[in-house]
Amino acid sequence: MTALRVDILSLFPDAFRGPLDVSILKRAREAGLLSVQLHDIRDHATDRHRTVDDYPFGGGQGMVLRVDVLDRALQHVQAQAEPPGYVIYLTPQGEVLNDSIVRELAGHQRLVLVAGRYEGVDERFVEHCVDREISIGDYVLTGGELPAMVLVDAVARHIPGALGDEASPHDESFADGLLEHPQYTRPAEYRGWEVPEVLLGGHHADIERWRREQRVARTGARRPDRLPALETTPSAPEKVGIPGIRVRDVAYPEDVPAVLNVLREAYPEGSVPSGASEAARLLEHSPGLLLVATAGGEVVGVIVAGFDGASAHLLSLAVVKEHRRRGIARALVRVLQGRLRERDCEQITAFAAPEDYVAESFLTSQGWQRASGSAWTQRL
Ligand SMILES: C[S@@+](CC[C@H](N)C(=O)[O-])C[C@H]1O[C@@H](n2cnc3c(N)ncnc32)[C@H](O)[C@@H]1O
């Protein structure tokens, strides 16, 4: 038995043939997992000109697909198989398609997709015959054929067995709310462009951790609108032995302006992100490794590190002027070191500009070793 039957009503059924005849959709159809039946709406016109549309009542531009023709076409299609299909009209006015709608639709045995044209369809058809209106995005296309293909493609990937690898749709972007981690393949080095070392090491746990971090980071940087779905709950503020000072994870996006202010005060102009979207990139380097020190709830210190699964880099460390010389930077480094040890990180590297004597004296006093001109390391 076919896992999913899709009937498509369109004025241009031939438009579907190419996309349905290649790759995964073709294989799914050949394997009997997906059946797509194309129907020409025009076959249900009754006059000799095979008219399917007419002028809009009340005047205005363009033509509208007639309710009687569409209804006849739909009834004809529904009568061809059991159970009756769940009827979807593709329209820019519908719910915007997303991963959870796709998954829900993949649970149906039968879908009937109606592709509009011209100014759209008579509203009575939508009211009386359509179960759901779906859009593929906030823009207007000339017809519903491409949206119907998008929907079939997205849904077909969720038919068990269609991808040949049951796990695949669950690993991809949006499956758990996050975007997917970056992917690399051979060659490992090309024109000096390298693959992250952690992926070449064959250490499964490190690779998994790196991927998870990348997924969180990418989502934060590219789709912060999806962040509420992430585990962004900051850890409880930690006491660090300095009266009134607590250290905790950055809260995104609430802390972003304060974090930027602290960094701007400490770093030269141009080296600090200038806005919230750029600030999200801080997270890209640092899910779990961007910490703030607070005094009375105000952010007074920031530490940012990056970890590639093998080694860590201290990217920024700053404390506002009024709170310097209280041991806050030291406390931030200590908490960060704890986080890195939890990730089995063995060493951290920091960079201090050649004549940054403040940074040098801080690093030396904390037991860091100079590794080269500007690089300093510390074993964890
Ligand atoms: C030119 S559009 C009609 C747009 C309509 N007059 C409006 O302003 O909402 C013609 C047909 O293309 C399809 N279509 C266009 N954009 C779409 C989108 N973003 N998502 C789904 N279907 C779309 C619909 O089937 C629609 O009936």
Image (tube, rainbow, N blue to C red):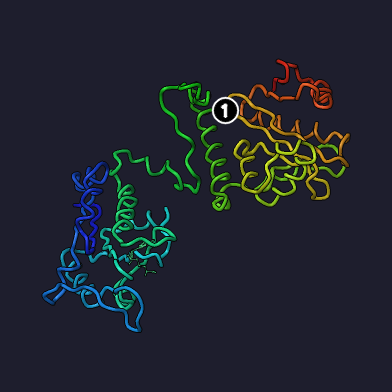
Residue 93 in picture, x, y percent from top left = 41, 67
Residue 84 vs residue 57, the one in the foreground = 57
* Residue visible at 71% across and 38% down in the picture: 270
Dividing the picture into quarters, in which one does residue 146 lie? Answer: bottom left
Asked whether, in this view, residue 303 is left or right of residue 311, the answer is right
Instruction: Residue type at mark 1: give it.
Output: Gly
**Label 1 C-beta lies within 8 Å of the nearest ligand 1 atom:** no
Q: Position of residue 275 (x, y in %)?
A: 66, 47
Picture residue at 31% right of the left edge, 79% below the top: 56
- Determine which quarter of the picture holds residue 75: bottom left
Ligand 1 quadrant assignment:
bottom left
**Which residue extends farthest bottom?**
58
Q: Please give the name of the residue rendered at 28% of the width and 62% of the height, measured from the top-left corner.
A: 113
Q: Who is closer to the viewer here, 88 or 379?
A: 88
- Image quadrant in which the C terminus is located: top right
Q: Residue 351's x, y, as percent? A: 72, 25
Residue at 24% across / 74% down in the picture? 53
Q: Tag 1's secondary structure?
A: loop
Query: Residue 330 in the image: x percent, y percent?
Result: 80, 31
* Position of residue 66 in the picture relative to residue 167 (left or right): left
Instruction: Please give the residue where the numbered disc 1 appears in the rendered image.
Output: 309
239 up-or-down from 365: above or below: below
Most extreme residue toward the left, as rendered? 48
> In the current view of this chain or complex, which residue is farthest to the front?
61
Q: Mark 1: few, some, or many residues within 10 Å (few <14, many ≥20)? A: many
